[in-house]
Image (cartoon, rainbow, N blue to C red):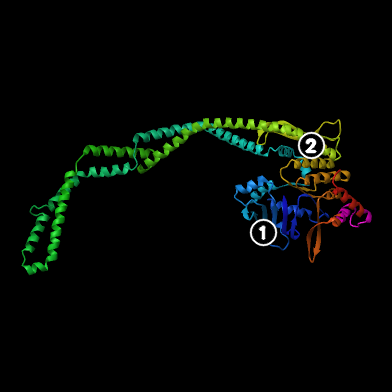
Amino acid sequence: MLTQLAIQDYAIVDRLELDLTQGMTAITGETGAGKSILLGALGLCLGERADAGSVRHNCERTDLSARFDIQHLPAATEWLKARELPFDECLLRRVVTASGRSKAWINGHPATISDLKSLGEQLIQIHGQHAHQALMREEMHLALLDDYAGLQEARNQLADTFREWRNTRRRLKKLTEEGSEVEAKRQLLRYQVEELDQLALGEGELQTLEEEQHTLAHAEETLRETQLAADCCSTDEGGALSLLNQAYAHLSALPGSDKGMLANTLAMLSDARIQVDEAASELHRFASTTELDPERLAWVEERLTDVHRVARKHHVAPEEIYALHESLQREVAQLEASGDDLESLSNQVAEYRERYRRDAKQISDARQKAAIRLGKEVQQQLAFLAMGKAHFEVAVSPRETPAPEGLDHVQFLISANPGQPARPLAKVASGGELSRISLAIQVVAASHSTIPSLVFDEVDVGISGATAEIVGQLLRKLGEKGQVMTVTHLPQVAAQAHQHLHIEKRAKRDTTLTHMALLDERGRISELARMLGGVKLSDQTLAHAREMLHASQRPPH
């Protein structure tokens, strides 16, 4: 239930805080006084589109908030819990700047406009003054019937199934049309992969082959030069080690004092003898392990020739062959899998088709039953609204093609006079009749709604006299089950309300502001008298208004 609406610097309102209660609340005022401001501000809190024109002249921004009691709204509570938001109460806030930028909050946490809309659908329903015009569009008939029958969730699930079915069919068609191209590409890739499989070049093998080829090709030269180097280091006469030994012996034969002065030199010669000796040993070992293998060299060079040949054929560098092989293998695997996808997609299409038809049939059955009930209830309301001779029915017929909303075509039919066949609303109903038919449908829909807060914006247009009083009684009855707010120009409707809000324009210095007040009994009588007889209130008009108010507020017998 909406408990409070706060408005600041919106349109021609500077500041307004409105506390609301259960029951029926009438909102009245002169034409142009700003009754639509209240609903406009509420609409922005519920996620309607905003623009810079919402901001009061010469102000930086408009700040709006709507507070709801959600103790008896489990759907709204679950919505908040699912998003980890506080759920003791619900406060929607919307700020619009003079530049047209907009921000939103839910219970103090930043939110998107779509969040406001999604949550707002759980909190309140607004029935607009142009609802009778919407009835001219037959797609609205289906939506109204589904709302009445409580089929929203089932219909949403059916729409999801339809989308999956349609998308899967598109994918299957695309795969089927591309089948011949895919097969040709698959055969080419298989041939390329088989050639690379035969080559079987391992990761890093090319570098190993090139290094081995270089070693084998230069093995003879390496062996010769290594042996010569070893001979230069040998102990044979003329070798480096022999000469070092001789130099060391000569210095060692010096007298003690001279020998001491050359101690560092002797140490270096000693180290040199050791290092040359070790070098000679290492050279001999290397020479002994170096082999001449012309057969291995021939195999390696042939292997390298094959690698370069395949690389040229595939227009890649030799070092890119391994990566190319892996890439082609993956591509072949994907194309091979696409063959399985074709069968899989065919199965999925069949599954989605069967699920759609099964669920659509269940929804169709539910619509057929609900259509009978809705027709009877609207018929009863039309009798209250002085159209007792009219015949109203909801026709459910099969569609030619499946659609997201199901397999049904729904149409509201009316026969305004006995003996005439029922025909579509747009072809039969006059303006006044259409207003009453629209109101009857909205009252029936609202009476079955699980949302306790309902707003009716001048839905009584085109109605007067005794019928207007009945409309007021219907709205009051709805208000006794929850909360109803109605903007009206009819005193017969306003008199039925549990509370009465009056809106008027007031000039203040060089500006015009909207003022809103909750009327007491005296104020209500004066406002009803104005609605009955105009600006000049006679004693007779006031007496009529007083009697109308007292009669409306008395409990029914």
| Residue 557 is inside the magenta segment | no
Dividing the picture into quarters, in which one does residue 465 lie?
A: top right
Q: Residue at x 18, y 47 (%)?
A: 286
Judge by depth and name the residue closer to the eye, 487 or 331.
Answer: 487
Location of residue 521 with respect to 200 vertically, above or below: below
For residue 463, say whether it is visible.
no
Q: What is the three-letter code of the residue carrying label 1?
A: Ser
Residue 381 location (% of width, % of height): 82, 39
Quarter the C terminus occupies: top right
Judge by depth and name the residue closer to the eye, 444 or 73.
Answer: 73
51 left or right of 498 in image: left
Q: Residue at x 9, y 58 (%)?
A: 245
Judge by depth and name the residue closer to the eye, 249 or 221.
Answer: 249
Residue 252 location (% of width, % of height): 7, 63
For residue 248, say whether it is visible.
yes
262 left or right of 23 in image: left
Residue 476 location (% of width, % of height): 81, 46
Q: What is the three-letter code of the residue carrying label 2?
A: Glu
Query: Please, what is the dominant secondary structure of the magenta stretch?
Result: helix
Mark 1 vs mark 2, CA separation in Å? 48 Å
Q: Residue at x 16, y 56 (%)?
A: 275
Dividing the picture into quarters, in which one does residue 468 lie?
A: top right
Residue 501 location (% of width, % of height): 80, 54
The crowding category of the residue bearing disc 2, from other C-alpha atoms within 10 Å (few below 14, some 14 to 19, many at least 20), is some
Helix, strand or loop at mark 1: loop
Q: On residue 377, which mark appears?
A: 2
Helix, strand or loop at mark 2: helix
Location of residue 317 with respect to 533 vertically, above or below: above
Find the magenta span and give its range. Answer: 525-541
What residue sits right under mark 1 in the picture?
Answer: 99
Earlier sequence position, callout 1 versus callout 2: 1
The crowding category of the residue bearing disc 1, from other C-alpha atoms within 10 Å (few below 14, some 14 to 19, many at least 20), is few
